[in-house]
Amino acid sequence: MLKKILGISLLIVVISVLVFGAVNRTLAKNASESGTQSGNRRSSEQTAASSEQTSEVHNQGNNGQGQGQGQGRGGNGAGGNGAGEGNNLPPATPGDLSAEESAALLYMREEEKLAHDVYVTFYEQWDFRVFSNISRSEQTHTDSVKALLDRYELDDPASSEIGVFTDPDLQALYTNLVARGSQSLAEAIQVGAAIEEIDILDLQERLAQTDNADIQQVFNNLLNGSYNHLRAFVSTLKTQTGETYQPQYLSAEAYQAILGDDTSIGGNGGNGGKGNGRRGQQP
């Protein structure tokens, strides 16, 4: 009887050990799986975070690249006929301007605006595309001068309103030019050509008054733009009316030098005047 009791007790102990071991193994397995899942989850979260950071850096890089390209395009666009901040202007020290240079920047800011405003007005009146195209270029021109005003910390004299000017001579001239160009489309085209002639003379005069490389660069770009605009108006007048444009301010020699060998649109210059470039004078 005692042996039977001992045997049963031993069996119970063995079963208990086996059950206890099985429970421990199950708990250990569950813990391991839980740890693995937790580790995997943490790894996944870290990977996602790393991916987001990489994506953010990449996006910032793309945004920076896009901004840089946008500024570059803006500079190139301005540089086509003018000079924007994207043109890599030579270095300058703000405030390092003579009285003549300051006056030149202030005047050219409004003079380029005058050309823009006259062409916008003529486009609205005559619905003729050449005025729309060149007015956009003139906006680039006046913006280019504005960039120099900002650079040298000069107050901007230009109004945002079409046909409004701080300089009284330019204000009077705007009124006179618009009245003249309102007579006919041919007269409006000739007004456009006259504006470009005077622009050329004014820019040449002011280029001789500055030794600042950044101002020279902008003014030279504007000068090249005015050459192109003058050729465009002369060619348009010939195409639309058959008339040969006669220079109103430039000398015959200077006018012919700008047109080059294309006498089909400009003739020989006739008795073109040798105006001093002041817009206030009328031919």
Image: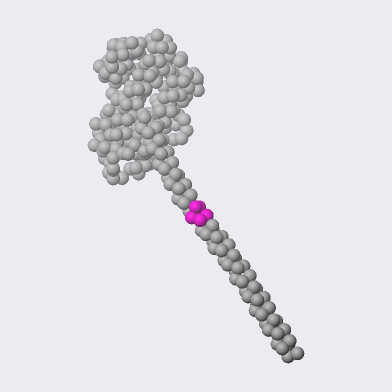
Give the extent of the magenta segment.
47-52
What is the quadrant of residue 103 in the picture? top left
Q: Is residue 9 above or below residue 71?
A: below
Q: Quadrant of the C terminus?
A: top left
Point out the image quarter for the N terminus: bottom right
48 drawn magenta: yes
- Closer-to-camera residue (151/281): 151
Q: Is residue 91 magenta?
A: no
Q: Nearer the viewer, residue 8 or 210?
A: 8
Direction top: furthest residue = 242
Query: Quadrant location of residue 99?
Result: top left
Q: Residue at x 39, y 20 (%)?
A: 192
- Above-or-below relation of 21 to 195: below
Question: Where residue 115 sits: x, y (%)?
Answer: 40, 26
Residue 75 appears anywhere in the view: yes
Residue located at (48% from left, 55% from top): 50
Q: Which residue is depicted at the point 63% across and 70% down?
A: 26
Q: Position of residue 108 (x, y in %)?
A: 35, 32
Outermost residue, right side: 1
Coordinates of residue 57 in the picture (x, y in percent): 45, 50
Secondary structure predominantly adopted by residues drawn in magenta: helix
Q: Is residue 136 left or right of residue 196?
A: right
Q: Position of residue 158 (x, y in %)?
A: 41, 35
Between 20 and 88, the residue placed more toward the observer is 20
Q: Residue at x 44, y 22 (%)?
A: 131
Viewer-nearest residue: 213 or 248: 213
In the depicted structure, whether residue 68 falls above or below residue 251: below
